[in-house]
Image: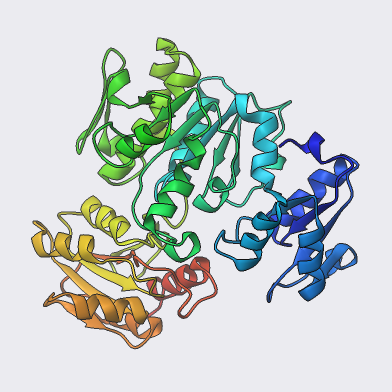
Amino acid sequence: MQFDDLAGRTVVIWGAGREGRAALDAVTARGIEAVVAVTGAGAVPDDLAAVTVTGTAAEARLEAADVVIKSPGVPHTDPLFVRLRERGVSVTSLTDLWLADNHERVVAVTGTKGKSTTSALIHHLLDAVGVPSSLVGNGGTPVTTDDPGDAQIAVVEVSSYQAADLTVSPRIAVVTSLYPEHLPWHGGYEQYVADKLNLVAHDPDVVVVPDLVGVPGTLVAERTRTRPLTPLDVGIAVSPSGLAWDQVGDLAAADLPLRGTHNLLNAALALTTVHAVTDGDPAAAFVALNALRTFAPLAHRLEVVPSDDGRTWINDGLATAPESVVAALAAYRDERITLIAGGADRGLSFGPLTSYLAGREGGIVKVVAVGPAGVRLAAESDLSDLRVAADFATAMQWARDDTGETEIVLLSPGAPSFDEFASYEERAAAFRAAARATT
């Protein structure tokens, strides 16, 4: 479905958040009337009150609509969503409508982790090689802010929530990783995978994946007729020491402004994507490889924050799955670390983290666990160097006091922040304040 298909139809936008507002702007700019429906306990912004209905009236409007433009926060498991499907109401999304009009110029990136960094890397490298691009999508910028007149390529970060509603694939898709995340929203891991890989289910020209033998490569191959493209296919080898691109050049890990082998892989995926966009142009490959040196890392991802106690404090607050914590620890495998882990508990297995810690070779890791997830981590592990703090403030005080054995204080929680905080940014602010506290 495209925006033009909405003309003359009864359109209701489900949700008044960032994407709901952007959807309203997009349809009204095309002369299409729409009403906004807010269900449940969702708040109504004052400036949208005149076009918004709530409560039972909102549900009635949704059920009577010809087309519902659903915000990504509404899960497919929502009983009202199920009812709309059963009634035959067409349900789409802002991303799907926009992608239907723009898919030929879109590079879309998804994955459990790594999608934001990989998207930003692709945007940075495309601009470096002279291909103007925009960066939109899940990072907080609605897709409709892209300007085709300025950007030859739109690089779009796509969450699992957004991918689930797609009926069209981009020309080039990138899948960075797949492991359990957001399971209550999707209704289980299998459905999470299906929703995530819906991005590649509608015949993209190219799908870039890390390799063809592991996850996500094998799962992608099952869900698309497009042959996946890997870094190795274009001559890029990844090792802990850096990147080696056959007939192009090498980049040492120390020259990439991102720490960890997982980020070297993200960089390799970005280079492979640029190779696809530029049809393998050797000159573009050389420029792109060297442009990695000037990439500015994103906040909340192994971000070094100012501290006054002589140690390095690192905010990796967006590491909300145990596998991400393992990647962060592996990036500092020789250093002695105080790890702040835990938060709201979604029931994800801590097996990957506990197995890594049990077999870690290198610097010690002292774990300060916090929140319901931290309590479960302690209960499910037999780690000798683990303490459970009553709250995040106590965890920060323990981290401040324990200056004798560790060189790094790492916030890599493996869980969301919603047990104590309204957002990961709020939790990061508390971490920053502790790092700068005066003893």
Q: Is residue 399 visible?
A: no
At x 44%, y 11%, the residue is 281
- Asked where in the image residue 422 lies, by quadrant, the reply is bottom right
Q: In this orientation, which residue lies closer to the viewer: 333 or 347? A: 347
Direction from residue 286 to residue 335 in the image, left or right: left
Which quarter of the figure has residue 433?
A: bottom left
Where does the N terminus fall, quadrant-wise?
top right
439 to 425, vertically: above or below: below
Question: In the image, is 213 to the left or to the right of 276?
Answer: left
Up-down: is 3 above or below 207? Answer: below
Q: Residue 84: name its quadrant.
A: bottom right
What residue occupies the far bottom of the structure in this picture? Answer: 390
Image coords of residue 36 (percent x, y): 80, 60
Residue 55 lies, in percent from the top left, at: 77, 75
Q: Residue at x 49, y 67 (%)?
A: 424
Q: How many marks?
A: 0
Residue 282 visible at all: yes
Residue at 86 percent of width and 42 percent of height: 29
